[in-house]
Image (spheres, grey):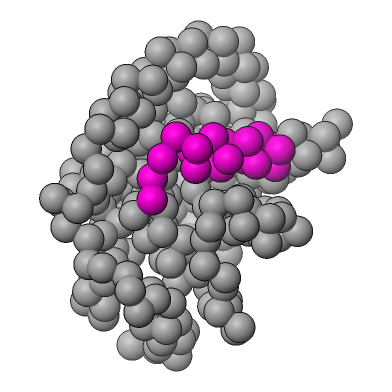
Amino acid sequence: MNASEDEFVDDIEQAPRGPDTPEIRDADLPKIYPLIKRILEFPVALILVVCLLPVYLGLTLAAYVSHGFPALFMFPRLGKNGKSFHIFKFRTMVRDAKQQMRNGASNDSLITPYGRFLRKTHMDELAQALNVLFGHISFVGPRPMDSDTFNFILEENEIWPDILKTRPGITCLESILADLPEIDEKVRRILKIPPPPETPPTMSLPRRYPLDRFYIENESLWMDLVIVWYTLRTFAGKAAEHR
């Protein structure tokens, strides 16, 4: 294990859990809201996908002009209870990006100018409305991980499997707090989230863990609405920056 991996594991182990935080078991999770949530999400996702069809067409044509087909990129992720699925994103890299990375090319050098725009505005993630429609993910939930990352974490620390106890999502607490650090204190106060450690972890995954765990333990319609609201604010702000 190299130095960066050691730092990663140390940050995971130092992620605050709180003295009174119980271990999560299937029986501990509320069964009603996740069911209601899925019932509500399906028609919303269906309407959203229909409304986004012109946008999908425009993004597909722009992708073809920028870096050719295919416009969509699908990659495996772990869903609820560890079930694998393919998540959809609009492709932001050159067609042979994987081969070039094997040959030593850097990640950033393979992102096209159009792809960089998609990433900065999060428009590459609009295709994930299809994943919500199919029931792979929710609009709100812990961000899905690939199996290699999950297994690496699991080997070093056994506290992470809780993340698979609920359906992953397009956006989560860590996403809005990372994109809008100025509202961190306000969101924590509204949702009664414990304050962050004095020296927060610098890496994304260990920073995510206490927030994802808090979400799993307290998942509710109110929390989802707050997260969606601030996600839309982030999306609108970044889109405005690129007009």
Residue 44 in picture, x, y percent from top left: 46, 17
Query: Taking the image as drawn, is residue 41 in sight?
Result: yes
- Residue 68 percent coordinates (x, y): 56, 29
Q: Main secondary structure of the magenta part?
A: helix
Q: Residue at x 25, y 52 (%)?
A: 164
Classify 209 as above or below 122.
Answer: below
**What range is drawn magenta here?**
218-235
Q: Relative to 182, say whether 85 is above or below.
A: above
- Residue 232 in magenta? yes
How far from the left and from the top, in percent, is residue 198? 61, 83
Q: For this rendering, which residue is in front, 226 or 8? A: 226
Judged left or right of residue 17, residue 96 is right
Q: Residue at x 38, y 20 (%)?
A: 40
Q: Is residue 172 magenta?
A: no
Where is residue 78 shown, x and y percent of the image? 27, 48
Q: If the image is split into quadrants, where does the C terminus sit?
A: top right
